[in-house]
Image (spheres, coloured by chain):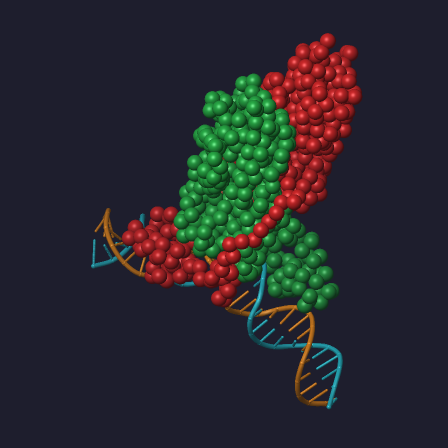
Chain colours: A green, B red, C orange, D cyan
Amino acid sequence: MRAGTGERAEDQQEPASQPGSAGRRGPRPAGAATISRVAEAAGVSRATVSRVMNGSTTVRPELAARVRAAAQALDYEPSVAARSLALGRTGTISLVVPDLANPLFQGVLRGLSQAAGKAGRQLLVAESNEDAEEEAILAIEARRNSDGLVLASPRAPDERLRELSDRLAPFVLVYRDVPGLAAPSLSVDNVAGITDLVSHLTGLGHHHLAYLSGPEASSSHALRLAALRAAAAGTPGFTLTELPCGSMFDDGHAAAGAVLECGASAVVAFNDMVASGALTGLHELGVRVPGDVSVTGFDDIPFARYTTPPLTTVSIPKNELGRQAWDRLWALMNGESGGYNVRFQPRLLIRDSTGPAPS
Amino acid sequence: MRAGTGERAEDQQEPASQPGSAGRRGPRPAGAATISRVAEAAGVSRATVSRVMNGSTTVRPELAARVRAAAQALDYEPSVAARSLALGRTGTISLVVPDLANPLFQGVLRGLSQAAGKAGRQLLVAESNEDAEEEAILAIEARRNSDGLVLASPRAPDERLRELSDRLAPFVLVYRDVPGLAAPSLSVDNVAGITDLVSHLTGLGHHHLAYLSGPEASSSHALRLAALRAAAAGTPGFTLTELPCGSMFDDGHAAAGAVLECGASAVVAFNDMVASGALTGLHELGVRVPGDVSVTGFDDIPFARYTTPPLTTVSIPKNELGRQAWDRLWALMNGESGGYNVRFQPRLLIRDSTGPAPS
DNA sequence: GGCCAGTGAGTAACCAGTTTCTAACAGAGC
DNA sequence: GCTCTGTTAGAAACTGGTTACTCACTGGCC
């Protein structure tokens, strides 16, 4: 993406060092109005200004108007930091994900961002770069800066999450279900998804499946693989070939040759990106999909409808996960129970990348 | 995405109302250690604890060790809110974008998140849902909760941004260049991108181009359209057909019929998503790409390499924009000049969706 | 007219840190 | 031995809000 991209400076502008920022005395805001200045201007106490700003009804309307006028005249905006300190909450929640480039987490981010925004809450985002310990550290750090946390942590060991649970609370776990964890989790039924996929493929006459593996440490990968192995073990005359792969387009693209070699008639890819890469790779090798080989994905990313051919996949409600994460977190922050754990049932979407096994 | 997705409650867990949260006296943290408690435990003053926590060297090593031990024993973590108040800064910066589903902004988000993370800063994210006035309001709100702002605001009028400039500073504008704005901007040379695209296509013998328009209010769309019109006006025997479209996959998909009707031999789509949708739509109509019609995109989203055929497009350094936005903002926050405005030169990527005009 | 309840607004005590100013003390120099 | 200087750590002021408590004043009721 960056390689070779030229860059050119132009449009020189005046230095633009912020006018009032040269630290009069206190720290940053310099000339910013404080509640005291507003109180003085309106001839009332700070308490009254505070009451007016927070919509308390115990202030005489006429006085309230005077305060509002003073605030307006001074461009007064309450200090968020001072408010947080006094109130003991920040008005912010945070989201920690392993990878912002992954549509799976982008979906949660969107859903959460919109739900939190509607409730007037700010959203802090941190990316752990797929590193298990980083996930934990960032989660703690993000949590300290907010009132609650939504954590997508596919790498960190169950035990680590359990021991962190106190410092992270209130928090909600997504795309994962850790037994014995004192936090609600919103997960996806990977087993059901894989089972649906396998029935669909065996129904089409496929007996030899290749699985393009996800990242070793991924908990979703582990569940999907286990479900596939179980299905294979439970069906006589069924062969499962496991091919190491990854989670990105390129991984799937690079695996196309191995797919061809192993002789499978259908490919179950770890996710849609891998499937989509494999589709392109197979196309380049002259393999027809679904004529020669069927291909399936997982997740139903927005792009899955626009691959050639459109991808048969398993749809999971990414935005909905984000929205519900907000609901749960909100409940938790109010001291209520976060409710039950929820496992979303994915939905099989049959498109054109799967067809009858070649005879 | 959500339609029909089943949901099932299971794994009932204990109520999990946070153990210590029932408000002992102060607000939230309940039993959390404060600097006073640590000071008391270590037998020193709060000032000394503060100095130790901030790595001041003016504390006797032996004393410092005692303080650290006490802090450790009490699980002490400084209050972010109190620190923000005293210091006058939050350690957070914010990003406001119109649409988190758009790969363009996802790229900036990633680049910014990583750069800010490396510097130990938190990142606040807000999404304006493509609404011009919402952009402004969210920007103010986000800015109040942080020390600086990166703003992607393709909708808000120039004038509105100029009048807001004081309240938003320090801030950096991305994907846009507003004349006279006292803030550095990082933009992309849309004109150069379109010019490259047009030369490429005319070089292949295309004389009739269809432009699949972006959203009316988008400043990128305006610039790209203007560049196309200029190119058309400057080239004899050149026809430009403008087709209303949009910015998403579906818009491009829906426009395929119109493309066919208008008789153009090449399609310049507003962006890669539109191009990709158009590709699928044309394929469904039995049109060969690039045999019958050539198609180009803009942005080079990760997916563009995996369409069928791979998409000829213009690459813009999305992550790099995020990284540089951080650098500029950092400079600004330190009272330095934010430097020159930068206009990135996009790079033409010729893939397989363009070919010679049919004769 | 006096008592009581209710209302509106001020006082002051918080929230949890940072930092300036000051003082105690130790060691060096004369 | 005394003064001067440098180091270390504490006292207290400060960041900008919120809120429990208190009190003055008003009106209703007897």
* In the foreground, A345 or B332: A345
Q: Is residue B219 visible?
A: no
Give x and y (percent) for residue A136: 44, 46
* In the foreground, C19 or B181: B181
Task: Classify B15 as above or below A152.
Answer: below
* In the foreground, B347 or B65: B347
Give x and y (percent) for residue A26: 52, 51
Residue A84, quarter of the rendered image: bottom right
Q: Is residue A73 visible?
A: yes
Residue A275, quarter of the rendered image: top right
Give x and y (percent) for residue B147: 55, 44
Give x and y (percent) for residue A247: 50, 33
Q: Please tell me which residue is depicted at 43% across the width and 36% down the height of the picture.
A: A216
B61 left or right of A106 in image: left
Q: Please tell me which residue is depicted at 58% across the width and 43% down the height of the picture.
A: A346
B339 left or right of B233 in image: left
The N terminus of chain A - image quarter: top right
